Image (spheres, rainbow, N blue to C red):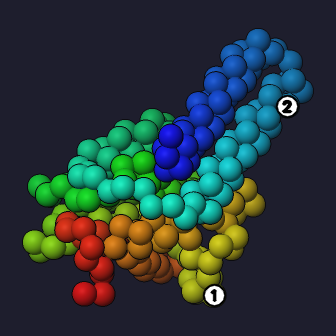
Amino acid sequence: MTKEKLFMGVVHEIKNTTATINGFLQLLVREVRDNTRARRYVNILASELDHLGRLIEDGLYFSWAGDIPLGKCDLAAILKRITDRAACLAQGSGIEIKVNTNPCPAIYGVPELLQHLLWNLVANALAALPDSGEILLELEPVDANWLRLICRDTGIGIPAADIDHIFRPYFSTKKTGTGLGLPLCKRIAEFHGGRLEVESDQGGGTSFILWLPVQRGRTKNQ
C-alpha cells in the first residue's frame, strides 16, 4: 500500500468511526429524552466528538506532505454533494442556499481534497448565518484555462483587523474552531495549482473566490 492510499484510508476510517459514534449518541438522546440533564450531557458529547473529528481530520490534511496522484474531477458534481449536505443542515434554519453552475470542463485534482475544501467554505458560510440569510455558490469557466467558484454569504462579515490573519494556521475567531480550516483550504487550492481569495465587508457578508486550473501544472499567477 502506498503512503498516499494509507493517508486517505486513515482519514476515511476516522470519518466512519466518528459517524458511527455520533449515530449511537443520537439514538441515546432518544432514550434519555425525559431526562434533561442526561440529554444535555449527550448533546455535549456529540458536540465535542464533532469538534474532535474536525480537528483530527483538518490536522491530518494540513500535515500531509505527500504527492497524491491527480485524476480528472467533475467539480460541479463535487459541489452538488456538498450543497445537498449543507441543505440538510440548513433545513428549518431560515438559510437559503442558491447554486448557479455553468457547464465546466473536468479538471485535474484529488476529489477528496477538493470536497474537503468546498465543505470548509460552505461550513464557514453556514456558521456566519446563525439565524437566517443566503449562501450563493457560483461555478463557471472564466476562460479555456481556469474555473472560478465563488462562495458568498450574507452573514456578519470578517472584521478588518482579522482579514489578514484568516489563512494563518491556528488563527480562529470561533470558540470551537480548529484554526486550520481556511489555511487548509488555501493549501489545497495551491496544491492544485490554484488560489483562494477573500473579500469581506463587516456586517455585509463574505465571499471566498476559488480559482482552479483546467490543465495540470498551470498556476494562478501565470
Mark 2–mark 1 distance (CA, rounded to whole Å): 36 Å
Label whose residue precedes the other's in the sequence (2 or 1)? 2
Q: Where is residue 148 in the image (x, y as percent from the top left)?
A: 26, 69
Quadrant of the frame with the C terminus: bottom left
Residue beneath the point at 32% across and 56% down: 70
Give residue 111's position: percent from left, percent from top: 36, 49
Quadrant of the rendered structure where residue 88 is? top left
**Is residue 221 visible in the rendered structure shown here?**
yes
Choose between 210 and 198: the one closer to the eye.
Answer: 210
Is 219 on the left-hand or right-hand side of 94? Answer: left
Q: Secondary structure under badge 2?
A: helix
Q: Classify 10 Å Cα crowding around label 1: few (below 14), some (14-19), many (20 and above).
A: few
Residue drawn at the location 62% of the way across and 63% of the way down = 63
Q: Taking 151 as reference, is 62 left or right?
A: right
In the displayed structure, would residue 131 be above or below residue 175?
A: above
Q: Where is residue 15 in the image (x, y as percent from the top left)?
A: 59, 37
Which residue is drawn at the image coordinates 19% and 68% (left, top)?
A: 215
Q: In this view, does 139 lie to the left or right of 62?
A: left
* Tag 1 residue: 161
Corner quadrant of residue 142:
bottom left
- In this rendering, the count of numbered labels is 2
Helix or strand or loop: what does disc 1 sit on? Answer: loop
- Furthest residue to the right? 37
Residue 41 numbered mark, or none: 2
Q: Is residue 68 or residue 97 the one in the foreground?
A: 68
Q: Is residue 143 above or below residue 36?
A: below
Say what amino acid the circle numbered 2 marks: Tyr
